[in-house]
């Protein structure tokens, strides 16, 4: 479903962001991407939703290859991918419901189906009662749920989440993570970049660890998770400048 | 249809920005329109002066009327010539007296020669053409002298050339300023909705789908700005007419060109601004 083959990404100013990245994600899989700031997590996610193209190698996702994807291919692909960010990226001047509806409207979805779909995802993320609330009236956790609802509205085959709990307190983190697990349980693959090692440790999902733009550990290939997670991962807070956003 | 609704909704969400956009476009087109108004009025004034360019051939006293009539017919067939008039001695005297006012009595009958006045067609009044017509008329044996105000025609011609070049240069400068201001105004709208555009792209909206509401927005602002500018120019023209000098206003074709130009600038400004933004995000 998702395949990265010998992917490298180099930026003219900041240098090599990724090198020799190869992995596959199967249908319905849950994958953590971990690693210190600047290790290339966000770059990989951007390559997955084709916001950027690799300098070398190939990103192949649901039949679309980074080598020859047209603008139209990318638009169609993104309608089948849900994307969630640390900063929620909600439109402040619209209600939760309108934010979710917006994602359907701009893809030209038939009007008749919009209302019921919005109601369904709002219920799914547990915010049916907050449909008319504006982002500023919602807590961080609730805002992230709205963002997740927006990502789910097009029934994605994969949910790409870039530090979705990065701005949340522990309680909100737990509830958002539970939501992501539920989404995964219903068959949607989830690829989640995170710093939160507690979260990684407490769950039994596949983990790909990056450092300096390279994969240093993939639990699918060397199934010895206890080795990594019994000891705290080294977190370098010295961004190399390769990770944008 | 959906894009038009989207454009309308966006304007409603930011009414102040939209109004500012229309007013900015209106003022930049107003400056351009005022310049246009001055240009067409200068052109009209020059045309009026130019209409007075004529070649006058003075005839010797002994000329018989048949020869003059034949010559007038010949000259009237020159491609440059619009009209040929005969001015008899009496008419010349009468005209001179009329023009001299209180000195009218210094002229006596028989002092002034008869002449033929040759009026040239519009576009055939350059010094070269006037001189060539004058030279051809000189060849008639009964023509004593030919006058056409050589120096004056050359000055007028030069003035006209300067006015044309200055008009084009200033017109291009004003139009460029208008395009830049309109582009910047629309860019503000695009930046104000940058987050929306980013989200639209992430959820899979096509570039065309993102562009279309902005193009409609630019078109509407361009047309409204154009109409408002037209109103301003019309008011300015009325004021000048009322208190200063008689001027002419744009004809219907120029008004149409102005409003369509405003719309086009709006659409092009949007196209460029959104295009640049989409390439960047």
Image (cartoon, grey):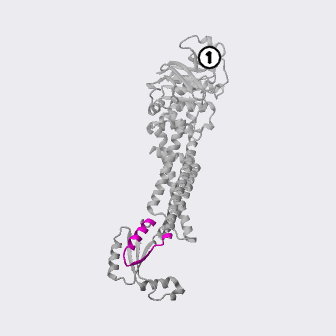
Horizontally, residue B52 falls left or right of residue A177, namely: left
Q: Is residue B43 above or below residue A238?
A: below
Q: Residue at x 48, y 54 (%)?
A: B261
Other-residue count near label 1 (Cα within 10 Å), few / some / many at <14 / 14–19 / ≥20: some
Location of residue A228 in the rendering, given as x and y in whole percent from the top left corner:
62, 13
Res. B126 visible in picture: no
Location of residue B73 in the rendering, given as x and y in whole percent from the top left corner:
33, 75
Q: Is residue A147 above or below residue A182?
A: below
Res. A226 visible in picture: yes
Segment tinted magenta in the rendering: B126-151
Q: Is residue B71 above or below residue A80?
A: below
- Callout count: 1
Q: Secondary structure at mark 1?
A: helix
Q: Is residue B4 above or below residue A143?
A: below
Rendered image quadrant of residue A93: top right
Query: Front-most of A187 and B150?
Result: B150
**Quadrant in the picture for the C terminus of chain A:** top right
Tell me which chain the residue with mark 1 is part of: A
Query: Front-most of B102 and B148?
Result: B148
Residue B149: say if magenta: yes
Query: Front-most of B81 and A124?
Result: B81
Horizontally, residue B55 falls left or right of residue A230, namely: left
Query: Front-most of B75 and B94?
Result: B75
Location of residue A169 in the rendering, given as x and y in whole percent from the top left corner:
66, 27
Residue A105: say if magenta: no
Location of residue A59 in the rendering, given as x and y in whole percent from the top left corner:
49, 23
Q: Residue at x 45, y 89 (%)?
A: B109
Mark 1 highlights which residue? A201
Q: Residue at x 63, y 32 (%)?
A: A140
């Amino acid at each position: 479903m998702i395949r990265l083959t010998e992917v490298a990404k180099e930026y003219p100013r900041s240098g090599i962001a990724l090198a020799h990245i190869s992995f596959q994600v199967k249908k319905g899989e849950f994958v953590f991407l971990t690693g210190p700031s600047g290790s290339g997590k966000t770059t990989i996610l951007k390559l997955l939703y084709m916001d950027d193209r690799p300098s070398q190698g190939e990103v192949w996702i649901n039949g679309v290859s980074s080598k020859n994807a047209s603008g139209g291919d990318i638009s169609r692909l993104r309608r089948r991918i849900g994307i969630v960010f640390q900063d929620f990226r909600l439109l402040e001047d619209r209600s939760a419901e309108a934010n979710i509806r917006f994602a359907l409207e701009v893809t030209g979805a038939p009007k008749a189906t919009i209302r019921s779909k919005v109601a369904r995802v709002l219920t799914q993320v547990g915010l049916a009662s907050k449909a008319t609330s504006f982002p500023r009236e919602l807590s961080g956790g609730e805002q992230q749920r709205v963002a997740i609802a927006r990502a789910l509205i097009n029934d994605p085959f994969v949910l790409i989440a870039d530090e979705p709990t990065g701005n949340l307190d522990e309680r909100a983190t737990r509830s958002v993570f539970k939501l992501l697990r539920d989404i995964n349980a219903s068959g949607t693959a989830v690829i989640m970049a995170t710093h939160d090692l507690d979260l990684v440790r407490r769950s039994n999902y596949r983990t790909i660890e990056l450092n300096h733009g390279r994969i240093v550990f993939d639990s699918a290939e060397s199934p010895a998770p206890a080795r990594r997670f019994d000891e705290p991962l080294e977190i370098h807070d010295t961004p190399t400048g390769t990770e944008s956003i | 249809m959906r894009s038009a609704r989207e454009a309308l909704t966006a304007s409603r969400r930011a009414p102040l920005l939209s109004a500012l956009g229309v007013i900015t476009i209106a003022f930049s087109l107003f400056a351009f329109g005022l310049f246009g108004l001055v240009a067409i009025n200068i052109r009209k004034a020059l045309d009026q002066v130019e209409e007075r360019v004529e070649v006058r051939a003075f005839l010797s006293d002994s000329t018989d009327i048949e020869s003059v009539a034949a010559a007038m017919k010949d000259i009237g067939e020159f491609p440059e010539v619009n009209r040929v008039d005969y001015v008899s001695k009496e008419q010349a005297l009468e005209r001179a007296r009329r023009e001299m006012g209180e000195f009218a009595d210094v002229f006596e009958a028989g002092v002034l020669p008869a002449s033929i006045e040759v009026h040239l067609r519009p576009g055939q009044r350059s010094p070269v053409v006037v001189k060539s017509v004058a030279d051809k008329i000189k060849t008639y044996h009964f023509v004593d002298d030919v006058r056409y105000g050589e120096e004056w025609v050359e000055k007028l011609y030069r003035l006209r050339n300067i006015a044309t070049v200055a008009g084009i240069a200033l017109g291009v400068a004003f139009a460029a300023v208008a395009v830049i201001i309109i582009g910047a105004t629309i860019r503000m709208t695009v930046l104000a909705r940058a987050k929306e555009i980013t989200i639209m792209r992430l959820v899979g909206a096509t570039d065309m789908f993102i562009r279309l509401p902005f193009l409609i927005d630019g078109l509407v602002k361009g047309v409204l700005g154009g109409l408002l500018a037209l109103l301003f120019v019309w008011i300015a023209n009325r004021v000048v007419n009322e208190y200063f000098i008689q001027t002419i206003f744009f004809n219907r074709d120029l008004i149409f060109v102005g409003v369509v130009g405003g719309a086009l600038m709006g659409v092009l400004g949007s196209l460029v601004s959104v295009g640049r933004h989409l390439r960047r995000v």
